[in-house]
Amino acid sequence: HAEASNLAYLGLYAMQHRGQESAGIAAADGHRIVLSKDMGYVADIFDSARLATLTGHSAIGHNRYSTAGESQLTNAQPILIDCAHGQIAIAHNGNLVNAQELKEHLVRLGSIFQTSSDTEVILHLYARSRAATIEDAIIESISQVRGAFSLVMLTPTRLIAARDPHGFRPLALGRLGDAWVACSETCAMDLIGATYVRDVEPGEVVVIDESGLKSYKPFLQERLAHCIFEHVYFARPDSYGFGRSVNEIRTNFGRT
């Protein structure tokens, strides 16, 4: 989409309730990724001049509510790296329960961590992967982490959305014309005029490029386990989470 970074900004604005510590947007133009992030609220960080630097036809964004790692700029997301597979940016909702164990192993192998966020572990696994394709390298890296993860990732030519096999955290897919949208809550789609299509399925990896959408299901089916805080704390009442109306679920909780 020609207005990718502006749409990412509006999506983050609609989901400001999910995190107020920091916000960031990464945009890709087919050749390189540009990143801008800062501490504070979305509307205070991104003005028209800053958004104008985020050129490209695809973008990802993140509002941070820290669950692992201190509240500081180095831990703000998306996190962008350049490695043997090229540039990649990542934004993560969730907690990786084996992050410390993986981090200690990677440090012994020579990895140098720049943040105290569990999300960075995925990038180190990705950078070390010997897989022949970007898709295979992503699948290989996220197959080694355990816990809750809904991810959006960006390479210069691809947008990737992935969800852990338990489906702990929500991740919705939508359309805006011939463009695809992936976000934690459907209220972000409502603001930009996109149409909700379906959820990214638990254990699914979705890859979007100029040729369209490809779906991969490389993980074994796990017991579904939705985070109750998404229903009663994080999500806006007018959103749909896990394919159901948040307002309806809360009303039913109250009735029960």
Image (tube, rainbow, N blue to C red):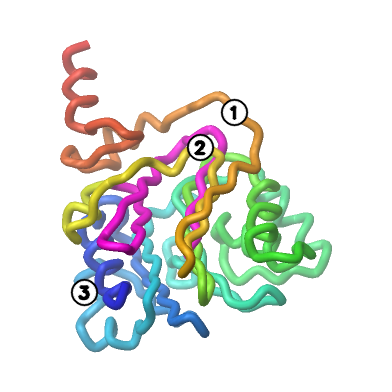
Q: Position of residue 102 (x, y in %)?
A: 72, 52
- Given the image, on which type of amino acid does mark 2 rest? Pro
Looking at the image, residue 223 lies above or below residue 142: above
Magenta span has 207?
Answer: no
Name the residue tied to disc 1: 222
Q: Secondary structure at mark 2?
A: loop
Residue drawn at x 31%, y 51% as measured from the top left: 174
Categorize mark 3 by other alpha carbons within 10 Å: few (<14), some (14-19), many (20+): few
Looking at the picture, tell me which residue is in the foreground, 198 or 65.
198
Query: Residue flagged by tag 3: what amino acid is it?
Result: Asp
Circle 1: element type: loop
What range of the chain is rendered magenta? 159-185
| Place of residue 56 in the rendered image (x, y in percent of width and height, measured from the top left) | 38, 80
Residue 203: quarter of image: top right
The residue identified by callout 3 is 44
**Which is more toward the observer, 63 or 67?**
63
Decide: is 140 above or below 157: above
Q: Nearer the viewer, residue 133 or 96?
A: 133
Q: Quadrant of the N terminus?
A: bottom left
The residue lying furthest to the front in this view is: 211
Where residue 202 is drawn, which disc sits there? 2
User: Which of pointers 1 and 2 lies earlier in the amino acid sequence?
Assistant: 2
Label 2, label 3: how many angstroms apart (C-alpha)?
34 Å
Q: Report x, y in % for residue 135.
A: 63, 60
